[in-house]
Amino acid sequence: MTDADRPLRLRTPSIADDEDRAVLARLAEGELDALEDLYDRYKTMAYSIAYRITNDATLAEDVVQDAFLGAWRNAARYIEGRGSVKTWLLSIVHHRAIDAIRRRRPTIELPEVDLPPPAALTAPDVWAEVAAGLDAETVQRALVGLSGVQREAIELAYFGGLTQQEIADRTAAPLGTVKSRMRLGLLAMRRSLEAGST
Amino acid sequence: MSGRDVLGGLTCDEVREAAGSFVLGAPGATEDAAVRAHLADCSEPHPEIAELGGVLPALAESVPIVEPPAALKGRIMAAAAAELAARAEVVPAAAPTPFPSPQERHARRSRASAGSWILRIAAVLAIVALGGWNLLLQGQLSAAQVHQRDIAAVLDVAAKPGSLTAVLRSDGGSGSGLAAIDGSGAITIAMQDLVPTTGASVYEAWLIGSDGVPAPLGSFKVGSSGTAYFAAKDLPPPPGAVLALTLEPGPNAKTPTLPIISKGAATAAS
């Protein structure tokens, strides 16, 4: 069987999501046990994302601690219709990690990473939840399918925390070209993953 | 609106072009604010934002798996326990009451003259009730302060090199807490939400090592606050050893009386 023939491995969303929501409800009540449950469920993904972004074990630990405590404090703010608990939690980890590495090079004016996302970004998107359940191998295949410059722009922004101007400077490409690479690259990834998940 | 109209300093076409950078958090402060302002006011739905943003969870799934160090859990739980204890200490201040207007003062005087005796009796009863409530609050505040100090003492032990920590949790009942064991085998436990002991009954602490045999560490009583601080000394246990509490009919129990009230595994703290 070739990679292309291999079926997509999707998680079973309903049971895990129901359990997650139950944990989060207990978390919102301030239950310490619920924090332990949430940590046990997502510690590996959370730490893996933090480590991939910071490339520093100590900083990654700080990021994960900050993210879980943040989730514990703000569990009541989680809005069920805007995505799964897993997506919500891992986005907190991502934001905290990007914030941490940007603070190491505070030479450029950056948006606040804790700004609430605009409604257009938090509109219900069932496919985003499917995307969160795709396994790493499937996503890697979609990433490899992008052009080199598209993949580079996306990875520098998402994992490197670089701004579009920093990416333009680093890759010696015009700013407009960098924007196009990110937009078209994400679009191509979505099309690729959609095609594979149907 | 057309793609050429400007909102937030950007046209719809410019927002569409910036959508990838925006969802990746890469525009920089000025353009990020401009896109947000445009999206807040634009009558068009801009589905490209959600469409591209929906790819981000997949990107998160692409990272190589790296297991966190075992000690991280203990650090997070200890920080949360300390924060919880500190939170319990804070009593919110009463909201200020605005000074009544002349009309309100006149109305109050009228009502007072109509039923002044009833109001005076009610006021006396209210003062008595409030006094009792205040005493209850003081008791709760004091218990929270004591528990916070207990947690701080456990965290001091946990901060020593080579220490183990354990989060003790109940299985369906009440009673949770934090424990630390330093390299010399000194054990400290801070508990809350325990059912008060009565008569000769005591809580017994047990250390269950890899052989599965519970070794008694000592016993303690619990008052109406439900909190307790316990310290003992034993041989340093290996990581993974379990600390457990049982309720015993009296001190010096040699074997635990089930059920286990609260328990947790000791993991490396640093």
Image (cartoon, coloured by chain):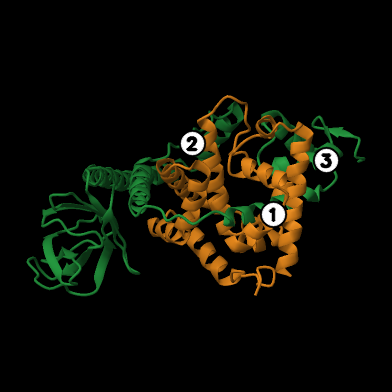
First in residue order: circle 3 vs circle 1: 3
Q: Earlier in the sequence, mark 2 or mark 1?
A: 1
Q: Is residue A118 visible?
A: no
Q: Residues within 10 Å of mark 3 (few under 14, many from 20)?
A: some
**Direction left: furthest residue:** B252
- The answer to whether residue B186 is above or below residue A108 is below
Tell me: B196 left or right of A6.
left
Residue type at mark 1 is Gly
Q: Secondary structure at mark 2?
A: loop
Q: Which residue is mark 1?
A: B54
Find the distance from the CA under tag 3 to the CA under tag 2.
40 Å
Chain drawn in orange: A
Could you tell me the amino acid type at mark 2? Ala
Q: Position of residue B12 (x, y in %)?
A: 85, 39
Q: CA distance from mark 3 to mark 1?
A: 21 Å
Q: Is residue A73 left or right of residue A2?
A: left
